Amino acid sequence: MSLRINDQAPNFQAQTTQGNIDFHEWIGNGWAVLFSHPKDFTPVCTTELGYMAKIQPEFEKRNTKIIGLSIDPVEDHEKWLQDVEEVGGSTINYPVIADTDLNVAKLYNMFPADETGTAEGRTALTNATVRSVFVVGPDKNIKLMITYPMTTGRNFDEILRVIDSMQLTAAHKVATPVNWQQGEDVIIVPAVSNEEAKGMFPEGWETVKPYLRKVKQPG
């Protein structure tokens, strides 16, 4: 069964570079980003892990934890992360899951449920579909899913932008328009009536269309 936005993020227990975790317990009451990799010692992923280490404080400002995953054992992860730190110039302070039994990849539909075998003998090409990003909210539901090809480095600044947008929605009942950036006008969600909006946005709003009401970013 495939996963969709707002489905409960499958829980799992796994070994990581920072010890064993229960995913839902590890998330706690905040947000989380799970980003996966097909294999250790791959060039694009090396740059991604390093960049995530560099911008980890930005996720922390948003009450968001980050966790990587790769289809290799912890011992390989630890060697690989030495390269990542050297290339990226930042220390890796977040865990990386060792999904050697392919369990998490299958739970998150990055492999078919009937995929057999373990990490042993697999290559980046046979694991090419393990290139997804999942954002999970405090309710443990999936808020975002993006899958990239192996040859295209992910834009994690975009993930931060989306988290900002979703957290604004959760706190203020607003949506964000195309190409929105922090500080720009937002949109009052259709579920909020004009009467309700008067109390929420006393300075008023611009009615572009009856269903499209722009307002200054709250908060």
Image: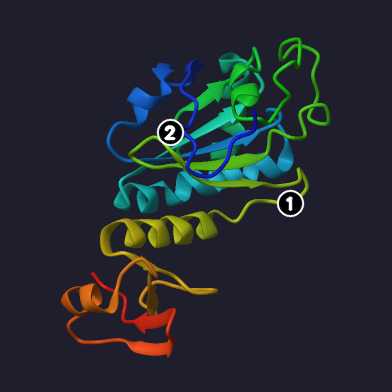
Residue 181: image location, x then y, percent: 45, 73
Report whether 79 appears left or right of 217: right
What's the residue at 43%, 38% (across, down)? 141
Picture quadrant where residue 147 is located: top right
Q: Secondary structure at mark 2?
A: loop
Q: Which residue is mark 1?
A: 152
Amino acid carrying label 2: it is Tyr
Q: Quadrant of the N terminus?
A: top right
Residue at 77 percent across and 34 percent down: it is 128
**Residue at the location (64% across, 33% down)?**
2
Residue 99's label in the rendered image is none
The local crowd at label 2, few if under 14, some if 14 to 19, many if 20 or more residues have their Cα within 10 Å, is: some
Instruction: Out of 105 and 85, give the one closest to the viewer.
Output: 105
Q: In x, y percent, where is residue 145?
A: 58, 45
* Residue 89 visible: no
Rounded to the nearest angstrom, the CA distance separating label 1 from label 2 is 22 Å
- Residue 213 is situated, as x and y percent measured from the top left of the image, at 39, 82
Q: Which residue in the structure is indicated by mark 2?
A: 94
Residue appearing at x 27%, y 59% in the figure: 171
Residue 175 at x, y percent in the picture: 41, 68
Quarter that holds the C terminus:
bottom left
> Horizontally, is 46 left or right of 112 in the view?
left
Amino acid type assigned to the residue bearing label 1 in the image: Thr
Q: Quadrant of residue 113 in the image? A: top right
Chain-order first, disc 1 or disc 2 = 2
Callout 1 crowding tier (Cα within 10 Å): few <14, some 14–19, many ≥20: few
Q: Secondary structure at mark 1?
A: loop
Q: Are marks 1 and 2 in contact (CB under 8 Å)?
A: no
